[in-house]
Amino acid sequence: MPQYDAIVVGAGPNGLAAAITLARHGCSVLVREAKSTCGGGMRTAQCTLPGFHHDLCSAIHPLGVASPFFRTMPWQEYGVRWIHPELPLAHPVALDRAAAVYRSLEETAAGFGVDQAAYRRLLEPFVRQSDALLKEVLGPLHLPRHPLLMARFGIRGIASARSFVDRWFRTEEARGMFAGLAAHSILPLEQRLTAAVGLMFAVTAHGRGWPFPRGGSQQLANAMQRYLEDLGGRVQVDAPVERLDELPSARAILFDGSPRNLVRIAGDLLPAGYRRRLERFRHGPGSFKVDWALSGPIPWRAEACRRAGTVHVGGTFDEVALAERANWQGRPADNPFVLVAQQSLFDDSRAPRGQHTGWGYCHVPASCTVDMTDRIEDQIERFAPGFKDLILDRHKMFPQDLERYNANYIGGDITGGVMDAWQLFTRPVARWNPYTTPVPHLFLCSASTPPGGGVHGMCGWHAARAVLRRRLR
């Protein structure tokens, strides 16, 4: 008899979600994790000075309380306290002017001047049904349960971010804010479907907010691990897997990793044709990340930025679009679009009393070796004069450092592969059930399957359901 019902290779948010889902159904589950702690993109460390706690990858969680899987997690029972900043997001477009995104749709729209009515008309139907919308989009292709809602979203979202703002917005604040939201796609903003990404991030901001866990993202991983173990699951850390045939016997194996690493680890177990298709899977631009230990809060000139958990630093729509397009042209932007989080404004556990942390990254070409520290800090200084004077210490990660931190971040790609119009729906290959493979007992549950990157656990949840239908019923 197999030793386990299922073995999960990799303990990121998707691997843990898959294991929890299976354990809830009474399955015996083993999780193998190469690093010394679970978490994948959910890890926190003191990487600058003692007492400064920095999120090494993910920091703010738009889907942390909105993901259909995460909404089933008993977070409070396992010590997770969600913190909601006063403003989920601010986006400065000039030294003294910034778009302010509140939880309230009405309050946000009121700040957009002549765009007030358009913003409200655009977002209100989706915010009102945000939970239903997320259930529809956070998964593989399927017949929608809310066809009218999805038709409306599809009509709006199929556009490029540029054509979208040209149609809907006139003010620099609304246009710049939407550019920052759409740039999470890590695609040129002239490309189709980037409008859908911008819309989804706006909906999550108004629907359930952009919170983060007190103490750092590691708290999410710790809670998921403890919950899994209470369900009877077993977790092994410091347990890398070099070949699948070295694992104990199991009725199903779920792989929370990139297609490239699956090919490496599965070897000849995969049919040659399927292996070649996995090898053609495309990874996108990388990221360059900096963490700062600061003697005080970032001195943003625009007041809204001083009340926001996340600040998108890039200026106007055209400036953000220029920066994101450069990455696809093989050169890092001179004035990059920088995503900044300032958790310590709202979480006093992150830094010593009176001091603060800063978290920021920009997109760069894959495997880029250019040190972007000065360019990132110059961008922040542009909107927060005096920022550089506050820096006590910094820790930076090049794309190759990110790949060493997590072997699935190929070339520094933190989203599990390009999410353009083709690969969004065929990740990792065109297959009716993307979580299955030609090997009956082998399944994929990583961000390289739908719905893609982000801390939401939905790839693992969908994969576990496929396992329950195919192998463990």
Image (cartoon, rainbow, N blue to C red):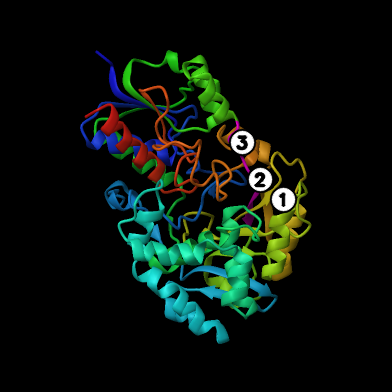
Please give the range of residues in magenta. Answer: 280-294
Relative horizontal placement of residue 165, taking residue 5 as reference (left or right) = right
For residue 327, the mark is: 1
Residue type for callout 1: Asn
Which image quadrant for residue 231?
Answer: top left
For the residues labelled 2 and 1, say whether their Cβ atoms are less than 8 Å apart: yes
Between 98 and 115, which is closer to the camera in this rendering? Answer: 115
Above or below — where is 299 with respect to 410?
below
Q: Amino acid at mark 2?
A: Pro
Which sits earlier in the primary sequence, circle 3 or circle 2?
2
Q: Main secondary structure of the magenta part?
A: strand
- Residue located beneath label 2 in the image: 285
Q: Residues within 10 Å of mark 1 (few under 14, many from 20)?
A: many
At horizontal 41% and vertical 47% (from top left) the residue drawn is 141
Query: Between marks 1 and 3, how big is the CA–CA gap?
Result: 15 Å
Q: Residues within 10 Å of mark 3 (few under 14, many from 20)?
A: many
